[in-house]
Amino acid sequence: MFRRWKLARALGCGALLAVLAGGCTKDPEIVERRLVVYSPNSCPIEQSEAFSVIYGDGDFEGDSAVASFYLREIDKMLDELPAQTRSVIVDVSNAARSKDWRGTAEVPPSGAINVLAWPDRETCRLTRNVEPRVDTTLGVFGRHIMIAGGSIAGKVPRTFVGDLSTGILEPLEFGLATRRSRASITAFRTSRSQDPSPALVAGGEDPDTQSALATAEIYVPSPGALGDLGDFARERIDLAEARTRHGAVVLATGETLLVGGVGQFGQPLGTLEIVDPVTRRSRTNDSALLKVPRSNPTVLRLASGEIMVAGGFNRSNERVPTIEWFSADAKVATFTPRDLVPGRERSFIALEGGGALAVVVPEAGATDIQTVWVISAQGTIEPGTPIDPAILDRSRLFQGTEGAPVLWTGQRWLRWQPWFAAFQPIPDAPDPSLYPAPSVPGIANGDNGLALWLDDTVPNQLFVRGYRFGTRSRFGAVPPHLLIEGTSGLAPDRIAGTPGSAIRFDPVSGLELGLGASAFVTDVTYADVSIELASSSAALVLREETGRELTVGGAECPFAVPPVLSLRVKRVGRQVQYSIDGADLRTCRTELSDAARVAIGVRGTNNSGSSFARDLRITRR
């Protein structure tokens, strides 16, 4: 179901020039944008008494702009939201049912602003049965979702594509040109801003012979169609080698990296292969090799842009304990490979502050295994507070807001607490006896507050199911002062707060950081920005979304003398300037990339001891 409301945007002279490329007028032009709120058919909003609050965020200073109305007030003008609104959060409540729905979306350059609102305390399936099958692949690319390939007795599985901003899910007219199971699905953009995004479906195996395939296919969206849904191009990309049961991730360059898998002779592969969305060609000549060839690996792009490969199975079909790291371009190995206890099942997820989190399900009868591990940004592996094996039947990790991934254990929903290195129950989480939870692994989807998976709990049916546990926008507001009374709003890149850890918080001195230890503001990124640190001896880090960093107080922008009282940093466009203890601004010799949005963090740089950071203030410009 959906209803439409009008959102007014008043464009001043400067914005008018950018839109119309014409002369200025005295009066601002009013441009109507339609805000469309959807809900899944299985969890519909009852609009007659439902009340909605809209929060608007953007690259402007201050708290979120707020508009509110009853859903029955169709076509109400929401003139409380400013022209600079770049994202919205929709909060719908129904007091009579004590129930809330929430959704979030970024404002596109033109057209309607679509928001899919999910209810609290429930998991909901999308509209359509996608045909029960085995060995299929679920993938997200941009704001779209795809279920492709697999095997159904007596027929060819259809390919389904859905729009996660509306909940629309439809079978494609043509779909994949080659029958394939266990393929990978990744975004295949020619530019970072391309929306709607194309997708690459690579490799996999013939469902009948299980022979690995050496081709890939490109899904091309159709802007303006229902949900912008398109279909597959008829051309194919030849891969350097056949591979199935492999891992895949999008590199900072926008290229797709294929990792390991099983080759044409049925043995695990040690090769890494890159597929370029611009040239539409594949290459392996300048890529590194895995130390341990493996099938079914987990492949993560870390906050630094580096690639981590973990898990999988070796030539003897044994679980691989070895974790490997590669540079952001996948050309060289970076850290020394390290082993992690394999267990019966493992899952891994990148942490927003840096590094990764691992949860290990013990073998049946094992009682002494460590179940939670933090893999730091520098490649060390440290134990977290273990989860009781009695409640850990599965390990299903999903990206979370506030630097806190969410875990389904097979019995409970838990949330990671990064400053305590422990999982805690989620209040008001869905009751698994009422709402099905993941029996198969979920996927990363670019929305840190939404878990998505395939639901096969109903006989002879298969659905896409989701659970929303958070809504945060990269344009969201943060408190005016951070690191005053605690660490709220930031996430560390390793174990913190335990005896001997390199990060801890003290109410008097602030955040204490050992050499190289970092903590980053979670969820939000910035364009032009001013940053101030009081009582600081730590460096300030501006990290681009690709993982490239400019460290004020580091190699990219070194200090002659470190700050004693304060550090101020100003970013405008490519240029970054800094001021130490109130002195004149100096310009960093390194520049940022054009139009790069940056995450902000603090890092320890004192070779002889700890660095400190206190009273972090960030102002959008």
Image (cartoon, grey):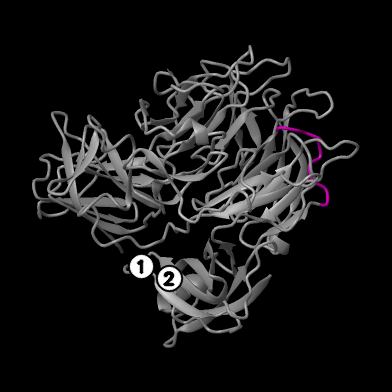
Which quarter of the picture shows residue 615? bottom left
Which quarter of the picture shows residue 242? top right
User: Can residue 91 be spotted in the picture?
Assistant: yes
Q: Dot 1: what SS?
A: loop
Residue type at tag 1? Phe
In the displayed structure, 64 sits above or below 582; it is below
Question: Is 180 colored magenta in this rendering?
Answer: yes
Q: Which mark is residue 487?
A: none
Instruction: Report whether 565 appears left or right of 266.
Output: left
Which quarter of the picture shows residue 222? bottom right
Residue type at tag 2? Gln
In front: 592, or 70?
A: 70
Q: Earlier in the sequence, mark 1 or mark 2?
A: 1
Q: Which residue is mark 2?
A: 84
Q: Dot 2: what SS?
A: loop
Secondary structure character of the magenta stretch overall: loop
In front: 92, or 19?
A: 92
Can you give x and y, in whole percent of width and height, for residue 300 in the image?
A: 50, 34
Can you give x and y, in whole percent of width and height, for residue 506 in the image?
A: 17, 45
Residue occupying the point 56% across, 33% down? 393
Can you give x and y, in whole percent of width and height, for residue 281 in the image?
A: 65, 33
Residue occupying the point 84% across, 27% down? 208
Instruction: Report whether 166 appears left or right of 351.
Output: right
Residues shaded magenta:
173-182
Q: Rounded to the nearest whole Å, what is the CA distance between mark 1 and mark 2?
A: 7 Å
Q: Which residue is mark 1?
A: 60
